C-alpha cells in the first residue's frame, strides 16, 4: 500500500541508531538540509552530526573529495573514537563510493559507512542497516544484531497492522482533552479503584512517558486506590546506552518511592514487551488500564483503557482499537534529548493538577 | 530557428553525423550551434583540430555562467558547446545535462539568431537527464542514427519507446551503414514500421575515419568529396521536413523479422 502520509525516514533512523551505538560523530553525506531537525536534536544528546553539504555541482561531479575533507575536519575538531558516515538520497543515487572515500581518508579504523537513503522503505530499515554496518565494523556482535533485526521487523509489522501505516492517510489528532483524562484517572483512584499502568516506551522517549506512570503513582499515594506498574525497563537487554536509560528511570522512580511490579522486557523490545505485560496482567484484578508509549504494540483487552502516544497520527487507530481515551505527548522527542532524569509530561502535569499535587 | 536532437546507440556515429552535418549546413550560410551533450565532451572535437573546448559544466564550476563564454567558434564558423560532465564512474551525467541546458537557456539562442541548433546526445537514454534535450522543449524533433544491425535497431527502438512515452516527435531515421546486405532497405522498413521515415543513409566510407584521425570533419579534410553533398542533402531534408510525428515503437519480434529480410 502506498501510504500518503510522510513517515519517519530511514536516514534519520540511521542517525538515531548511531547515537544509540554511542558513535561520537555522524557525517551525513548529502545536502545540508537533509535530516537537519533530527541532527539538531541528536547534538543535544551528545552525538555530533555534520554534513558534507552537497550542492548541485557535487550531484553532477560527485563529492568523494568533499567527504574525505569533512572526515578529516571532523577528526581534527572532535577527536572521535568512532565516526558513522550515513548516505542520503542524493549521494546514493549518484553511486558515491563512500567505502573507498573512507579508506582513502585513512580513517577506516574509526569510520564506517551506513548504506542507506530515503527511498529504502520504512524507518526501521535505516536502523537495521546501521546495526549491520556496526556489526561489520565490530561494534556489536551477530547475536545482538539478529535479536534487534527481529524486533525491528516486528515493530514494522505493528505499525503496518495497528499504527499509522495501517491506512493510506490518517488525519493527525491531539486526542482527548488532558483534563478530562486526568480527572477520570484521579476520580477512579478516589473511589479506591485499581489502575494498571503499562509503560511500553521506545528508547529515549521513556524519560517523558515514565512521568505519566510516576504521576499516577503519586496521585494514588495522595488520593487512594492502587497501582500495578509494568514497564519494559530491563537493565539487562540492549545496547549500553539503552540499558542506561532503563537504569536512569528505575533510579528516578525509586527516588520517588515507586517500584515496578513486572519488567516486561528491554527498552528496545517494545514490539514484544507489550504482549508480556498483558500476559502478566491477565491474572490481576484492576479497573483501568493506562498504556503508555507504544500502546499499538499491546494486544487489546476487555477492560476500560487509556492510551498515551506521541504520534498524532496514532490517535485514530488507537481509538478504533477501543481505547476509551487517547492522549498525545506532542514534544516527546525534543524534550528528552540530553536528559538523565524523568521530564514533565503534559498528561503527568494534568494528573498532578487534578490530584492537587504541587 | 530549427532545433534538433540526434540520438542513437553508443558508437553508432552520432557525433560523426552531427559534426559533418553542422559544417555542411554552415557552408550553406546558416548560423549553426552544435551542442555536445556527452560527458566525454567529444562531439565538437573534429571542429577544433582534435582539441577539446571548455565545457559548460567545467566553466560553471569556476563560477562562469554567461553563455557567451561557453560557445566557441569551430571549423567553418560553426558555434560549438560541450555540456561536459563528471569523470567516468562518478557523479550524475544526466543531471549535468539538465543543469547545462538550463544555463544555456533557449531565449539566449533566439537572441543570438541561430538558424539551426543540433544536440548530439550520448548513447541510449539511460535516465531522465539524457532525455532532457528532447523532453524539456529544447529540440523540436529528434533524429535517430542507426545501422541495419540488430543491436543498433534494438537501441533505436528503445529510444522510440522513450519518445512515445514523453510525447516527442521523431523527424526520421538517419542510416549510418555498416555494410550488411540490403541495409538501406532494412533501415527504411524499420523507419516505416515505427510510423516514421528514412531521411538518408551514409555509406561506410574510410574518408570519415581518416578525417577523424586528424581531428577534422570530411569537409575540412576532403572539401571536394561527394560525401559532403550527402551531408548537405541530409541537412536540407531536415530543414524542409514537415513529416515529424510521434513514433510508434515496435516489438523485438518485428525488428528481427525486418532485419531478417521480411519487410
Image (cartoon, coloured by chain):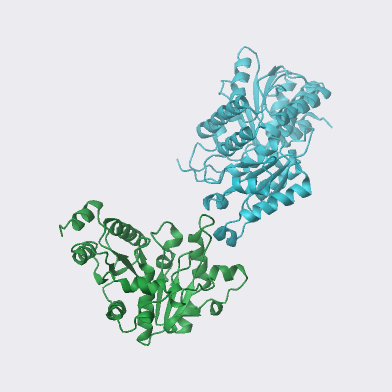
Q: Quadrant of the C terminus of chain A?
A: top right
Tell me which residue sits at (51%, 54%) in the image: B89
Locate residue B111 relative to residue B223 in the image: left or right.
right
Q: Place residue B145 in its image quadrant.
A: bottom left
Drawn side of residue A238 relative to residue B245, left or right: right
Q: What x and y, as percent, mark residue A137? A: 64, 35
- In the image, A157 versus A98, the foreground residue is A98
Q: Position of residue B3 (x, y in %)?
A: 39, 75
* In the image, residue B120 above or below residue A349: below
Residue found farthest to the top: A283
User: In the figure, A224 relative to B83: above or below?
Assistant: above
Quadrant position of residue A302:
top right
Looking at the image, can residue A306 be seen? yes
Q: Is residue B207 left or right of residue A220?
A: left
Residue B255 in picture, x, y percent from top left: 23, 56
Of residue A14 and residue A214, the one placed in the foreground of this image is: A14
Q: Is residue B76 above or below residue A246?
A: below
Looking at the image, how many numbered discs can be counted on the residues? 0
The answer to whether any part of residue A31 appears in the image is no
Judging depth in this view, the residue of A354 and B235 nearest the camera is B235
Write down which chain is painted cyan. A
Q: Position of residue A99 (x, y in %)?
A: 60, 45
Tell me which residue sits at (26%, 60%) in the image.
Answer: B248
Residue found at the very far left of the displayed protein: B262
What hue represents chain B? green
Extreme residue toward the bottom, this view: B29
Amino acid at each position: 500500500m502506498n501510504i500518503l502520509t510522510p513517515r519517519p525516514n530511514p536516514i534519520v533512523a540511521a542517525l538515531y541508531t548511531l547515537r544509540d551505538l554511542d558513535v561520537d560523530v555522524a557525517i551525513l553525506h548529502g545536502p545540508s538540509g537533509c535530516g537537519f531537525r533530527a541532527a539538531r536534536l541528536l547534538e543535544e544528546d551528545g552525538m555530533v552530526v555534520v554534513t558534507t553539504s552537497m550542492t548541485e555541482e557535487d550531484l553532477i561531479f560527485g563529492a568523494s573529495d568533499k567527504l574525505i575533507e569533512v572526515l578529516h575536519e571532523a577528526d581534527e575538531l572532535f577527536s572521535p573514537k568512532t565516526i558513522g558516515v550515513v548516505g542520503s538520497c542524493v549521494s546514493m543515487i549518484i553511486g558515491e563510493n563512500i567505502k573507498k572515500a573512507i579508506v582513502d581518508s585513512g580513517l577506516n579504523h574509526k569510520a564506517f559507512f551506513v548504506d542507506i537513503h530515503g527511498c529504502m522503505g520504512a524507518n526501521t530499515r535505516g536502523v537495521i542497516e546501521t546495526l549491520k554496518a556496526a556489526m561489520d565494523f565490530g561494534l556489536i556482535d551477530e547475536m545482538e544484531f539478529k535479536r534487534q533485526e527481529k524486533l525491528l521487523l516486528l515493530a514494522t509489522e505493528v505499525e503496518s497492522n495497528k499504527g499509522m501505516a495501517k491506512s493510506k492517510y490518517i488525519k493527525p489528532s491531539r486526542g482527548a482533552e488532558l483534563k478530562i483524562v486526568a480527572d477520570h484517572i484521579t476520580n477512579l483512584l478516589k473511589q479506591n479503584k485499581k489502575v494498571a499502568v503499562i509503560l511500553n516506551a521506545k528508547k529515549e522517549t521513556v524519560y517523558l512517558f515514565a512521568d505519566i506512570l510516576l504521576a499516577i503513582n503519586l496521585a494514588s499515594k495522595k488520593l487512594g486506590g492502587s497501582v500495578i506498574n509494568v514497564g519494559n525497563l530491563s537493565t539487562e537487554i540492549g545496547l549500553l546506552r539503552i540499558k542506561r536509560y532503563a537504569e536512569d528511570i528505575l533510579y528516578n522512580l525509586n527516588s520517588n518511592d515507586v517500584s515496578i511490579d513486572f519488567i516486561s522486557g528491554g527498552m528496545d523490545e517494545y514490539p514484544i514487551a507489550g504482549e508480556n505485560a498483558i500476559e502478566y496482567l491477565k491474572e490481576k484484578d484492576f479497573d483501568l488500564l493506562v498504556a503508555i508509549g507504544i500502546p499499538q504494540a499491546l494486544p487489546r483487552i476487555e477492560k476500560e483503557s487509556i492510551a498515551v502516544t506521541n504520534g498524532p497520527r496514532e490517535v485514530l487507530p488507537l481509538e478504533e482499537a477501543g481505547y476509551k481515551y487517547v492522549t498525545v505527548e506532542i514534544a516527546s522527542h525534543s524534550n528528552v534529548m540530553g536528559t538523565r532524569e524523568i521530564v514533565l509530561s503534559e498528561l503527568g502535569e494534568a494528573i498532578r493538577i487534578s490530584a492537587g499535587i504541587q | 530557428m530549427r532545433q534538433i536532437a540526434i540520438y542513437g546507440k553508443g558508437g553508432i556515429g552520432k557525433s560523426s553525423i552531427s559534426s559533418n552535418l553542422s559544417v555542411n549546413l554552415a557552408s550553406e550560410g546558416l548560423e549553426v550551434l552544435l551542442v555536445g551533450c556527452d560527458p566525454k565532451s567529444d562531439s565538437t572535437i573534429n571542429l577544433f583540430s582534435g582539441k577539446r573546448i571548455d565545457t559548460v559544466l567545467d566553466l560553471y564550476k569556476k563560477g562562469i555562467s554567461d553563455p557567451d563564454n561557453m560557445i566557441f567558434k569551430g571549423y567553418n564558423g560553426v558555434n560549438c558547446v560541450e555540456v561536459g560532465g563528471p569523470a567516468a564512474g562518478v557523479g550524475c551525467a544526466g543531471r549535468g545535462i539538465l543543469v547545462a541546458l538550463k544555463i544555456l537557456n533557449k531565449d539566449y539562442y533566439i537572441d543570438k539568431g541561430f538558424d539551426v541548433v543540433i544536440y548530439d546526445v550520448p548513447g541510449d537514454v539511460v535516465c531522465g537527464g539524457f532525455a532532457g534535450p528532447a523532453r524539456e522543449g529544447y529540440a523540436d524533433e529528434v533524429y535517430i542514427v542507426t545501422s541495419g544491425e540488430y543491436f543498433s535497431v534494438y537501441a533505436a527502438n528503445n529510444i522510440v519507446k522513450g519518445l512515445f512515452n514523453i510525447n516527442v516527435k521523431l523527424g526520421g531515421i538517419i542510416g549510418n551503414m555498416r555494410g550488411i546486405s540490403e541495409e538501406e532497405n532494412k533501415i527504411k522498413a524499420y523507419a516505416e514500421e515505427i510510423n516514421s521515415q528514412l531521411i538518408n543513409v551514409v555509406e561506410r566510407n574510410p574518408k570519415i575515419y581518416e578525417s577523424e584521425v586528424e581531428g577534422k570533419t570530411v569537409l575540412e579534410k576532403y572539401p571536394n568529396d561527394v560525401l559532403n553533398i550527402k551531408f548537405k542533402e541530409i541537412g536540407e531534408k531536415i530543414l524542409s521536413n514537415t513529416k515529424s510525428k510521434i513514433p510508434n515503437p515496435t516489438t523485438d519480434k518485428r525488428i528481427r523479422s525486418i532485419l531478417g529480410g521480411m519487410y
